[in-house]
Amino acid sequence: MLPPKNAIATISEMLDDLLNEIGSVGGIQASVLVSNNGLMIASNNTSSGVDDNLIGALVAMLIRSAAHVSKELLKGRLDYLLLHTEYGEIIIMKAGSNAVFTLLTDSYENIGLTIIEMKKACERVENILG
């Protein structure tokens, strides 16, 4: 017997919930999940002032380039990419084999906690997307 229809969360709802949860870590301006090709899967971008599609395209290009550099320099698999900028951090991490997860922060506080929570979120994304 199947549970009532409203009890089954859709993939979109599960991803939206996940992005909202990680947004509560503090200092998060935007959380964006895109395909490896940069196509938007889900986002929670309320205050960055940057278009989600632009974030997706740039992030996909960056992580491919960074993974190539890591491989060519014999440093192994890329864990995550951290861009420390004048106005905050940009953290980019693979979320399974088909997605890329990105956080934009407005501060440098709790970057370690943010990365730990992001890794947990990436595992959840991988389970949700399969």
Image: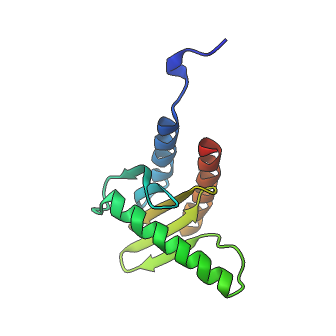
User: How far across and how far down the image is residue 112, in percent?
Assistant: 59, 67
Q: Is residue 39 left or right of residue 122?
A: left
User: How far across and how far down the image is residue 5, in percent?
Assistant: 52, 18
Q: Is residue 7 left or right of residue 58?
A: right
Q: Is residue 64 left or right of residue 49?
A: right
| Residue 74, above or below 130 | below
Query: Quick one: quadrant of the N terminus?
Result: top right
User: How far across and how far down the image is residue 98, in percent?
Assistant: 58, 55
Q: Residue furthest bottom?
A: 73
Q: Residue furthest front?
A: 37
Residue at screen point 34% across, 64% down: 54
Q: Is residue 80 left or right of residue 62?
A: right
Residue at screen point 49% across, 40% down: 17
- Residue 21 seen in render: yes
| Residue 110, above or below 43 | below
| Residue 33, above or below 7 | below
